[in-house]
Image (spheres, grey):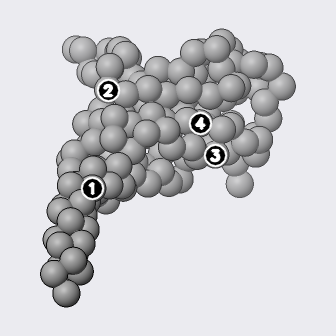
Amino acid sequence: MGTLSVRAAVAAAFLTIICPAAYAADANITLQDAHARIMPGAKVGAAYLLITNAGKAPDRLVAVSTPVAGKAELHSVTNDNGVMKMRPVDGLTLKPGETVELKPGGLHIMLMEVQGGLKPGDTVPLTLTFEKAGAKSVSASVDKPAGHGH
Ligand SMILES: [Cu+2]
């Protein structure tokens, strides 16, 4: 009896030590509706998606990569006296429960040095790296050129 309760106490102590760490590693980031705008033959393009933090702690997007582009950067768009300007941002913090939409005219993933041969409907693998959730992958489909879709 005495031995058992000591064991139970030791087990309980371990659980309280292990649980917070396990919880932190279990950050809950989901990626949805990923699509990319890359004109046939273009060297630059952009990717858009919805990022949701369903966890209970903030998380931060710190890096983006894709095998189809030499470089991928998170960009913001600001209106500078009527001129839309893009600039790289070094990360994106998501509050608990927050969904951020990357969309044309706003935050986007800029793709540079894009490899040739991508056509509408092709799939572009994207990897988004978060401080807590780690690397998350999503497939973005290449949009049809604007004005030609039906
Ligand atoms: Cu850009």
Of mark 4 and mark 3, the one earlier in the sequence is: 4
Between disc 2 and disc 3, whose residue precedes?
A: 2
Amino acid beneath label 4 = Leu
Tell me the SS state at disc 4.
strand
**Residue holding disc 3:** 139
Q: Is mark 1 within 8 Å of ligand 1?
A: no
Q: Looking at this rendering, what residue extends furthest in the front direction?
A: 2
Camera-side residue: 104 or 114?
114
Q: Which residue is mark 2?
A: 91
Q: Is residue 25 left or right of residue 20?
A: right
Q: How many marks?
A: 4
Dot 3: element: strand
Q: Mark 2: give few (<14), some (14-19) or many (20+) Cα within 10 Å.
A: some
Earlier sequence position, callout 3 versus callout 1? 1
Name the residue at 62% across, 28% down. Answer: 66
Label 4 with label 3: CB-CB less than 8 Å: yes
In this picture, residue 117 sits left or right of residue 148: right
- Report the residue at 43% width, 39% height from top: 134
Residue at 71% x, 54% y is 150
User: Real-space Cα distance between discs 4 and 1?
Assistant: 32 Å
Task: Please tell me which of labels 1 and 2 falls first in the chain.
Answer: 1
* Disc 3: residue Cβ within 8 A of ligand 1's nearest atom: no
The residue to which callout 4 is attached is 126
Task: Determine whether 129 is above or below 28 in the image.
Answer: above
According to the picture, the residue beneath numbered tag 1 turns out to be: 18
Of 26 and 110, which appears nearest the observer? 26
For the residues carrying marks 4 and 1, which lies nearer the camera in this image?
Answer: 1
Secondary structure category for the residue under label 2: loop
Residue 14 appearing in the image: yes
Amino acid under disc 2: Gly
Q: For marks 2 and 3, give the CA distance.
A: 21 Å
